[in-house]
Amino acid sequence: MNKRSKRNQLKHKKTKKSKGNEKTSIINNSLYPFWYNWIAFPQVQNNNELIEDTTWQEHLQLASKLYKDKSSLPKETILFHGSTVIDPIKNRTLTNRPFFFGLDAFIAIWYISELAGGNISDIDRLLSSLVQGKIKEEQNIEDLKNMTAWAQPELDKLRQKYESNIEIINDKLNNFIESLKMLPQRFDNYPKLINVDELISDLKSNQRRYYFLNIYKTMETIPYDYLSESISNQNPRDISKCKEKPCMHPQFGYHIDALEPPVELSMEFTIPANKIGNKLKLIGVYVIDVFKLNENKNKDFTEFKAPDAIVLKYNFTKNNIKQLSSKLKPLSKKLTI
């Protein structure tokens, strides 16, 4: 390789790395609510005050300045959606029902804690099936010891077959875990998962459930209706115009499935499922540990922040998006939004 080729190769690698870092930075800067670093989280005597509009007046005024008067979402805005699957809009049902997103990750992450109550995620299903397959093949090898009537060449042939199957399963497990990049983050008394064995061990313990925080980027400017200057508990599904066009409104991110404090104030954005088209592009997937959310559901923003439940992350490129999607494709199904 000549010097010019080496320089070009190094330049390409540097550019690729720079783009990856830029994407991660953009996502990380969008994780927190619109008021973060502008206005402090409300100081209250009792958490019940957090579900009152009056507690959030300053935050709501800021929301109006940022979103009410603009009435359109700029191109390359980051949106978050919690789901049991990767890229749920890809297999959405094409109805006029609003598809929900958060302008920050908090409301989407806490929604995952509600979703986990009655839905198994693809990551649980995939890893569980692989683990059960491996256990079955290991048991088959153990059973060979009792096949005294079989000739040794036949036993050796079966052993090779079972060992080969285990090797294939191990490759699938390792390929899957390698396609998820670990966050360089460590929780006190809560060590991050460092390999597939730890992930499987956690899964088998039933102490944690893993779901997906899908991260999208808008590919065009999207006009919307700003529903209210107050914090509305109205569901956009019940508002006729939100079945025709995108809507935005301030919304509490309730912890788990109870409409009780503590909460954080977020911005909810909806698009009718049949009007999403090519407006959004998946740029990343973070894996959420629901056990971590359950463990901290009674803590407010000052004590626990929803992104602390992120344990794995995956940033998409043209070359590797198909690789991970293909691993989960057999488990995908048509979604009802």
Image (spheres, grey):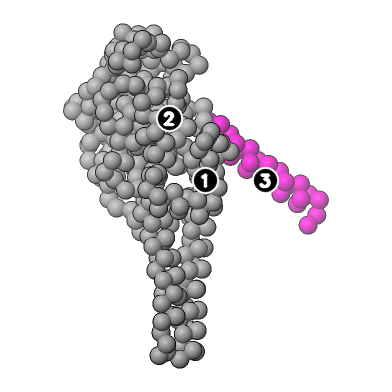
In the picture provided, is 12 more to the left or to the right than 233?
right
Q: Residue 306 carries which label?
A: 2
**Which residue bears the numbered disc 3?**
13
Q: Earlier in the sequence, mark 3 or mark 2?
A: 3
Marks 2,1: beta carbons within 8 A: no
Residue 132 position in % (x across, y down): 38, 62
Relative to 294, does residue 51 appear above or below in the rendering? above
Distance between the alpha carbons at the discs numbered 3 and 2: 33 Å
Helix, strand or loop: magenta stretch: helix
Residue 26 position in % (x across, y down): 53, 30
Does any portion of residue 59 appear in the rendered image? Answer: yes
Check disc 1 and report its element: helix, strand or loop: loop
Q: Give the range drawn in magenta.
A: 1-26
Check disc 3 and report its element: helix, strand or loop: helix
* Amino acid type, residue under disc 3 in the picture: Lys
Q: Earlier in the sequence, mark 3 or mark 1?
A: 3
> Which residue is nearer to you in this view: 248 or 286?
286
Relative to 126, does residue 155 appear above or below in the rendering? below
**Magenta-drawn stretch contains 240:** no
